Amino acid sequence: MHYDYLIVGAGLYGAVFAHEARLHNKSVLVIDKRTNIAGNVYTEKIEGINVHKYGAHIFHTNNTEVWNYIQQFATFNRFTNSPVANYHGELYSLPFNMYTFNKMWGVVTPEEAAAKIEEQRREAGITEPKNLEEQAISLVGTDIYEKLIKGYTEKQWGRPCTELPAFIIKRLPVRLTFDNNYFNALYQGIPVGGYTKMVANMLDGIQVELNQDYFADREKWNGLADKVVYTGPIDAYFDYKLGTLEYRSVRFETEVLDKPNFQGNAAVNYTDRETPWTRIIEHKWFEFGKDENGNDLPKTVISREYSSEWKPGDEPYYPVNDKKNGDLYQEYKKLGDAEEKVIFGGRLGEYKYYDMDQVIAAALKKANEELR
């Protein structure tokens, strides 16, 4: 059979584009090298718990159009992301808010907290932040930087904070209120039943072939369709001929515990340099410790996350947003733009750190341009 579109990758970008193409009466084939749909938002049920296999995914957006769109495919619960920072056994609120400042300095009023941050910024002599360390100190002061940012960030990126660009941390939530909601978003939640179920609803009625490696027989796959929507790594598409784009990867150690509660929160970040993992996720708390019938779950599942330098064969997670990689991506983008039959999209196809709502918005925009 011949198709209008071959979509390489059954993650969010591919699933949204496939759904829209089908609505426009286009024939679509979706392939994925994994044995499951949903890309990195894939959830797997273990002991009745929807486990986020490729790291915690919390849907949040200020985009009403995207929120209305995604609710066709799932009902969302009211989960609010309120992570906790663990520094050598001291627990602090994330995002940085009045609870954090009170525990760190004993301050009680927003005015006192702001004065303390300003005092530490002045002592550090920072006027124009040139790197992540200086940017962090100018936002929250030296004490919070040393305890709650430095170790975690250096584990996450595998580089000293003085070598990381300032913009990485500009989105850091700092609040002179007692608001524990990490995301300042209008809409937020977790799809009831897990993300895999949500993506399956997007792909309903669409032909999907799993465990299929596009690169193993690219000519065969390209010959099946008029156009290709490619959501894999853009440098891999061009056989790395200009060089390899860099990523950070993440390794997960997941275990089932025969107890109902391990840490009392969905996410706890370990911010000291000595603890080898960056955070522990306890998956049941994304859905309030209940199964889909509202029953308490007797066991729990945790995942320790270890950040690492990416190498071929690893799962690429976070693009390394420095000048060298940005310039290399622009060269690959020129090659991509010259491929008339191919659309490059998504986190890997565009070498961009996308939140889920941004992936959906980008896929909808491209589908509208392509299909209208």
Image: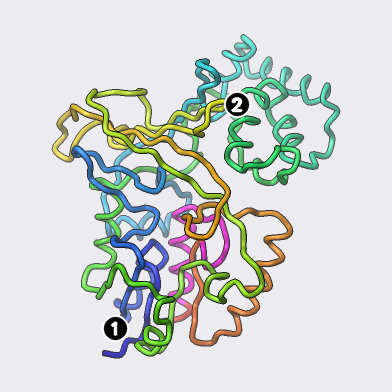
Mark 1, other Cα within 10 Å: few <14 / some 14–19 / many ≥20? few
Q: Is residue 109 above or below residue 84?
A: above
Left or right of 20, for residue 60: right
Q: Quadrant of residue 201?
A: bottom left
Q: Position of residue 84 (x, y in %)?
A: 47, 26
Mark nearer the viewer, 2 or 1: 2
Q: Is residue 37 visible?
A: yes
Q: In the drawing, does residue 80 fall left or right of residue 259?
A: right
- In the picture, the quarter occupied by the N terminus is bottom left
Q: Which amino acid type is shown beneath numbered disc 1?
A: Asn
Crowding near the residue tagged with mark 2, few <14, some 14–19, many ≥20 C-alpha atoms within 10 Å: many
Q: Residue at the spot x=63%, y=19% of the render? A: 110
Residue occupying the point 28% across, 56% down: 198
Secondary structure mostly taken by the magenta-highlighted segment of the chain: helix
Q: Quadrant of the C terminus?
A: bottom left
Q: Is residue 82 magenta?
A: no
Q: CA distance from mark 2 to mark 1?
A: 52 Å
Q: For mark 1, what is the residue? A: 25
Which kind of residue does numbered mark 2 sit on?
Answer: Leu
As displayed, is residue 211 above or below residue 258? below
Residue to which mark 2 is pinned? 148
